[in-house]
Image: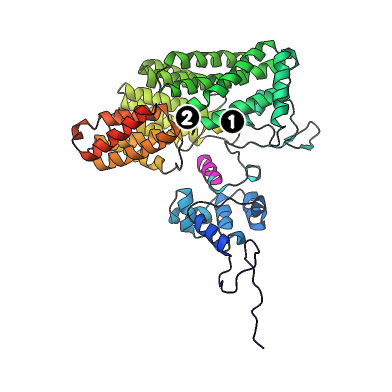
Amino acid sequence: MAYQTPPRSCSRCSTRLAWDNTDHLCAACRSKARDELVKPPTLPRAFWLHEHLRDALDGWHFGRLIAAYRTHPHHGRVLTQQTVAGWLNVTQAQLSRIESGRAPEELGKLIHWATTLGVPGDLLWFKLPSEKTRRVSDPRGASVSPMVLLPCTAAELRTTPGAADQSPPDDEITARVSRALRDPGSIDFVTVAHLRHAVQELDEQYLSEPSTSLLADAGRHLAWISFLSPRATNGRVRRELSAVEAEAAVLMGQLVWDASQRHDHHGARRYFDQAVDAAQRARDPLIEGLALLRKSMVALYGDKKPRDGLALALQAAETTAPVSSVLTGLATLHAAEAHAMLGARVSCERALAAAENRFAGIAAQDEAIHQYSPTHFGRMAGSCYLELNQPKRAEHFLQATAEFFDGTSKPHTIVLGNLALAGIRQGKLDEGLRRLHEAIEVIEHNRSGGGLNIVFGAGRELRRWRTSPAVHEVYDRLLSLTAAK
């Protein structure tokens, strides 16, 4: 009697393996495993509840969390440090030190790593910028499901964009808003929370989607909120509505300016002024400072008036200093660029150092943590040194920053466009053209107004090579962008 090999199953999905499959994974799981070498896999929640992962999470040590992640049995094999290091934009040697050394504490890196690996936000010891769920406690200390929306302060509403992860159906939300529009005095905290959630969802889309595709929805929500805000009879509700109005007006100003390719300065300023007024009514220095910061950007990059931009950036920093290191740091970075535009290198570098110190002191509880990105400093420092006519120094910051991006966000276009300028100004034509092509590819998706301005500026600086076929190719692509406007 012939010996029969006992049936074997896939170690990942438990499907029975074919008799001639000597691997421990089925064909489908093996294909997925190959894809996972390129990017982190999408993992079930049960993955993160593994004993070793929970120990690392409870110990607040991200290095140990990565080590436990790599060796988790779900993968069907041990992921190499080199593979995971590639996902996290670090070297294999750096990852080895992260896993075996002291617990990393730099918030920007922790956020980047957690987002890349897909760690659930409610299991972390710090807050993710895009986190949309939370658990709150009622006055008796009992845990309340995120499904229950409690009346809360402006700060609580602002830092929890998705006040309900399991939100009511769209028709219920529509009915609530419609009822409030018919009877403004009936509006309650739940309806305000849904309006805020809708505005913040649009704000998240702004980073990667064409502004023209968001204008209609943003304008409609701002109109509703502006109508309801002065008519609410409950004082606390009216104050929360004013805060949401300020957020919606800031978003609308950004969209108008970006959609006009940074030409409609008057329209953008009108919305930012509305935001300042609403924030002052809500007694919310955070949103007021954000609106002032956006006004400083219009002065700097639209009007080309660095002195006005500097004054507004300093005013924004002063407004937010008591409440947010994130926004104070961002405002200080724009003050640095204003100094660079004025040719004041020493003042620029002092402001850059001050901003870096602010970012180093960011706490996980910062109400504007969702505004922070580890790319901010390098992106702005690169812009500053381009203004100071130091393209090699600019390139150093921009190259390091470009490694953080993997997608089609609007800040990515700014970095790539400025890298192209840095290369062109150093006479490195091939490098400049390569970066310019990369920037154009991203702009073709997101239609970034700031990115368009930079790549067209870079195109003008290619005139001395205008007889080169490679330059003609870039000009053709720029022409196509113009046709698609």
| Residue 117 in the image, given as x and y percentages of width and height | 55, 48
Is residue 153 among what the camera can see? no
Is residue 102 among what the camera can see? yes
Residue at x-position 74% and y-position 20%: 188
Residue at x-position 60% and y-position 47%: 119
Label 2: which residue?
Answer: 210
The residue carrying pointer 2 sits among few (fewer than 14), some (14 to 19) or many (20 or more) residues within 10 Å by Cα, namely many
Would you place residue 243 above or below residue 166 in this image? above
> The residue under label 2 is which amino acid type?
Pro
Query: Which stretch is magenta?
Result: 106-115
Q: Quadrant of the N terminus?
A: bottom right
Chief secondary structure of the magenta portion: helix
The residue nearer to you, when weighing 229 against 84, is 229
The verdict on residue 300 being magenta is no
Between marks 2 and 1 in the image, the one whose residue lies nearer the viewer: 2
Scheme of colours in the image:
rainbow
Element assignment for label 2: loop
Q: Which mark is residue 201?
A: 1
The residue nearer to you, when weighing 116 against 380, is 116
